[in-house]
Image (tube, helix red, strand yellow):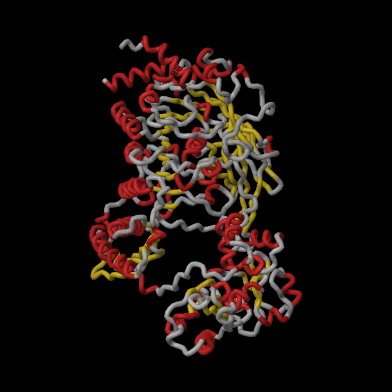
């Protein structure tokens, strides 16, 4: 069986979000803590649970049951940060381990066999080392697969070798939630089909499951029947796959930087190759003599030192140019882009690389941001002429700068200006707002085709500005006046609808009223009123 | 060979085999597929390859993006030049596959240089040109397009184009003077195949055909979006009375020598043939 080779120890901290919140907010141990996400309790520590707080309670229910409980909002970032910092003690004790999720980590048992006499001894040593170091309570679980070990850890159990399949088959089908949010729908289907335990699912033929539920169903079937899935990616220690170079004197010369980056990139790639891996994304960090630093992650399809050197050069040029002018225009493609009406205006030329101030870049650092096996990086046969496309776009980036070639993406937001996520070709997209979150009041299709940013005046028939109130518009809009002074008569207008969000935080508070208008020229616009001023935010072109 | 004596032959070819341009006769490249609603706008039912197409008028960007949508879903790469900051949500609404679309935020005066680089490997380039190219630049551009068999869509009138789509009239509905929101836009577009009516964008953001009986009477008896519109336009040019006034007054049309007799497809076919013959030598 796969039992012996895949045997895994999982250590989990129960109610991790509550523990992390206590660390984050310096709450004394023993005080009840409840963590809220989207208005519902998602985790509570033992004192809070003994007071009757359970997952799914709302804030008011927490107040009723346990008035002294501290309520914290879930902070995913803090969850991850505290956990990966806390488990540093393991670095000296085990050869490799994987962080499964905040609060849970897995250690392959065969890596412990050389250092410890038996499993119980290993678990005791590791858990006591972790508890001494962090003060958190760790539940161990051992089983033949990672999934089974995670379930076992929830019950603080050790599953005997060879018993993994029996252990799994007794577990309820809902434990498959571990496989992620997309499993929820399938679990419901399984439940309706009368499959109540993992054993019920495991008894089905693999081929039938594959035919009916596809690859994801097959994955769940594998989990349920205790077959080992893909081996886990190891928790790779940071210092192994980055390279750093401190310069003797600060430099702003891009040719010097390019030359150094080529050597540095070759070092990094050699390091990556020695691990038997391929690097598909690279993070370039530059430190300036004055103390600022710039970090960008690039995806490079054809990873070689010349490509890395080009990216570093582009990043350095854009960044130094920005520092020289006291701002970072490279970050915002909007400002570099001429207005569609003003296409003839010459864009500000990029400053010459030799003209930078005295201090420059003092240190370069390259980090392999995404590593994958060589097979994972191979281009598919079915991607039509991607290689030529890449070549063309890289050439354009070389001519006009990396921010001139943009690929579209979507993020969360109400208006097209917010949902737009244009990312330079081959850079990793960094959405600021989650598209999965609800955005009540978001604009429906048909949406404007271009995003505009200009202040306009919306006037009533008597020439006075149109007010927007929560109850509706103050007057019938009759004319729109553009910044150029040109006016168009409004022939039709939509109902105005307000957006109010973030009122609990003055820094994020948004209150705006939106309006669609059609003018006598047959043109349609999306307008938005914020802070007493109408803005043209979108145009149906 | 006397060019004028070829006209009946071409007429026959065009009517019987659907080959309406000499380029099609020589190259036999099938056009890029387009949305079924837009397909009657094109002489061969799709976006011609190796040719320049202009899409002008209000909502030309929406029309251009809707035209490229089907091709991007078939893994064809498309780039936009000089489009300002397009709204990604509407690009997705119009059916464009976001994985095969790239926007170039390059200075307007560099569009020709950028386009000439993109033509090398892209299947479709959608451009709002910052300036009109000179005659020699245009000739080189067209030769490159023909050689690469890619499609160039210009959102401004440009001579040398083989098909011209002009959005002549837009009528937004749904706003209801403060009681609703924009739902769809009824568009009247003129092309080499006649006058067509459709919704762009339709209620879901994609182009849609006009629902029967819900909108104002279609004047002039040209059934919108039907396959025989081309034949009708050939025999009876400008059948809709409401097309006549703006056709005469439109300043854009006058700049393009190819379109002053655009109502008669035979004329452009002959022009095409003449070009090819002189090209072949």
Residue A86 screen position, x and y as percent: 50, 80
Residue B80 screen position, x and y as percent: 42, 40
Vertical comparison of A96 with A250: above or below? below
Residue A402 screen position, x and y as percent: 36, 52
Q: Identify the image quadrant of residue A157.
A: bottom right
Q: Residue at x 55, y 23 (%)?
A: B227
Residue B250 screen position, x and y as percent: 48, 21
- Total tally of numbered discs in the picture: 0
Q: Identify the image quadrant of residue B121.
A: top left
Q: Nearer the viewer, residue B151 or A48?
A: B151
Q: Nearer the viewer, residue A71 or A367?
A: A367
Whether residue A403 can be seen here: yes
Q: Identify the image quadrant of residue A370.
A: bottom left
Q: Nearer the viewer, residue B166 or B254?
A: B166
Q: Residue at x 66, y 24 (%)?
A: B216
Q: Nearer the viewer, residue B104 or B76?
A: B76
The answer to whether residue A384 is left or right of residue A471 is left
Vertical comparison of A135 with A304: above or below? below
Vertical comparison of B197 with A426: above or below? above
Q: Residue at x 39, y 29 (%)?
A: B51
Whether residue A348 can be seen here: no
Q: Residue at x 37, y 25 (%)?
A: B23
The answer to whether residue A270 is left or right of residue A182 is left
């Amino acid at each position: 069986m796969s039992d012996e080779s895949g045997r895994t120890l999982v250590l989990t901290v129960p109610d991790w979000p509550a523990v992390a919140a206590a660390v984050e907010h310096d709450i004394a141990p023993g005080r009840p803590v409840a963590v809220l996400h989207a208005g519902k309790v998602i985790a509570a520590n033992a004192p809070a649970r003994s007071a009757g707080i359970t997952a799914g309670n709302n804030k008011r229910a927490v107040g009723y049951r346990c008035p002294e409980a501290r309520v914290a909002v879930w902070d995913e970032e803090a969850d991850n940060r505290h956990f990966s910092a806390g488990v540093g003690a393991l670095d000296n004790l085990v050869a490799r381990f994987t962080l499964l999720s905040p609060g849970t980590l897995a250690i392959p048992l065969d890596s412990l066999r050389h250092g410890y006499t038996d499993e119980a001894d290993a678990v005791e040593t590791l858990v006591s080392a972790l508890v001494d170091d962090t003060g958190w309570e760790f539940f161990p679980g051992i089983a033949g697969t990672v999934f089974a070990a995670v379930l076992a850890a929830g019950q603080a159990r050790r599953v005997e070798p060879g018993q993994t399949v029996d252990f799994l088959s007794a577990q309820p089908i809902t434990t498959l939630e571990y496989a992620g949010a997309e499993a929820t729908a399938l679990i419901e289907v399984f439940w309706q089909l009368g499959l109540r335990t993992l054993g019920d699912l495991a008894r089905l033929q693999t081929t039938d499951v594959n035919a009916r539920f596809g690859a994801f169903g097959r994955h769940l079937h594998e989990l349920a029947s205790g077959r080992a899935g893909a081996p886990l990616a190891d928790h790779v220690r940071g210092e192994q796959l980055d390279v750093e170079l401190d310069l003797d004197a600060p430099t702003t010369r891009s040719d010097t930087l390019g030359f150094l980056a080529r050597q540095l990139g070759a070092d990094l790639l050699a390091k990556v190759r020695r691990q038997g891996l391929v690097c598909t994304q690279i993070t370039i960090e530059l430190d300036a003599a004055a103390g600022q630093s710039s970090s960008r992650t690039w995806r490079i399809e054809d990873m070689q030192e010349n490509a890395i050197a080009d990216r570093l050069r582009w990043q350095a040029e854009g960044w130094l140019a920005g520092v020289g002018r006291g701002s970072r225009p490279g970050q915002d493609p909007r400002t570099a882009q001429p207005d569609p009406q003003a296409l003839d205006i010459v864009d500000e030329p990029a400053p010459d690389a030799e003209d930078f101030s005295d201090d420059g870049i003092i240190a370069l650092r390259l980090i392999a941001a995404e590593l994958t096996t060589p097979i994972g990086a191979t281009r598919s046969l079915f991607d039509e002429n991607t290689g030529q496309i890449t070549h063309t776009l890289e050439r354009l980036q070389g001519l006009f700068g990396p921010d001139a070639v943009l690929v579209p993406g979507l993020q969360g937001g109400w208006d097209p200006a917010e949902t737009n996520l244009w990312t330079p070709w081959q850079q990793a997209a960094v959405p600021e707002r989650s598209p999965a979150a609800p955005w009540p009041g978001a604009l429906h299709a048909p949406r404007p085709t271009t995003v505009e940013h200009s202040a306009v005046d919306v006037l009533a028939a008597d020439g006075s500005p149109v007010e927007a109130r929560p109850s509706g518009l103050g007057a019938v809009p009759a004319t729109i006046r553009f910044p150029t002074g040109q006016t168009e008569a409004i022939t039709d207008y939509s109902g105005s609808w307000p957006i109010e969000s973030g009122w609990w935080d003055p820094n994020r508070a948004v209150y705006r009223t939106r309006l669609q208008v059609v003018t006598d020229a047959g043109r349609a616009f999306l307008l938005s009123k914020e802070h007493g001023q109408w803005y043209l935010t979108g145009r149906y072109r | 060979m006397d060019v004028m004596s070829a006209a009946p032959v071409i007429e026959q070819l065009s009517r019987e085999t659907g080959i309406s341009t000499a380029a099609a006769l020589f190259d036999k490249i099938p056009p890029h597929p387009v949305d079924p609603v837009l397909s009657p706008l094109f002489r061969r039912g799709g976006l011609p390859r190796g040719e320049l197409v202009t899409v002008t008028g209000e909502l030309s960007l929406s029309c251009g993006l809707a035209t490229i949508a089907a091709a991007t879903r078939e893994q064809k790469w498309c780039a936009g030049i000089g489009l300002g900051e397009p709204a990604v949500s509407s690009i997705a609404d119009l059916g464009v596959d976001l994985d095969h679309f790239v926007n170039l935020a390059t200075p307007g005066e560099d569009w020709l240089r950028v386009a000439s680089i993109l033509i090398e490997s892209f299947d479709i380039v959608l451009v709002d040109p910052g300036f009109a190219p000179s005659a020699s630049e245009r000739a080189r551009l067209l030769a490159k397009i023909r050689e690469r068999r890619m499609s160039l869509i210009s959102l401004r009138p440009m001579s040398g184009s083989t098909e011209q789509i002009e959005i002549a009239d837009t009528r937004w509905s749904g706003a209801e003077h403060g009681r609703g929101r924009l739902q769809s836009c009824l568009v009247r577009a003129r092309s080499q195949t006649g006058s067509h009516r459709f919704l762009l964008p339709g209620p879901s953001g994609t182009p849609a055909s006009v629902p029967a009986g819900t909108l104002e009477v279609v004047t002039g008896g040209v059934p919108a979006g039907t396959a025989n519109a081309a034949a009708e336009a050939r025999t009876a040019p400008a059948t809709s009375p409401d097309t006549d006034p703006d056709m005469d007054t439109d300043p854009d049309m006058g700049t393009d020598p190819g379109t002053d007799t655009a109502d008669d497809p035979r004329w452009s076919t002959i022009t095409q043939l003449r070009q090819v013959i002189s090209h072949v030598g």
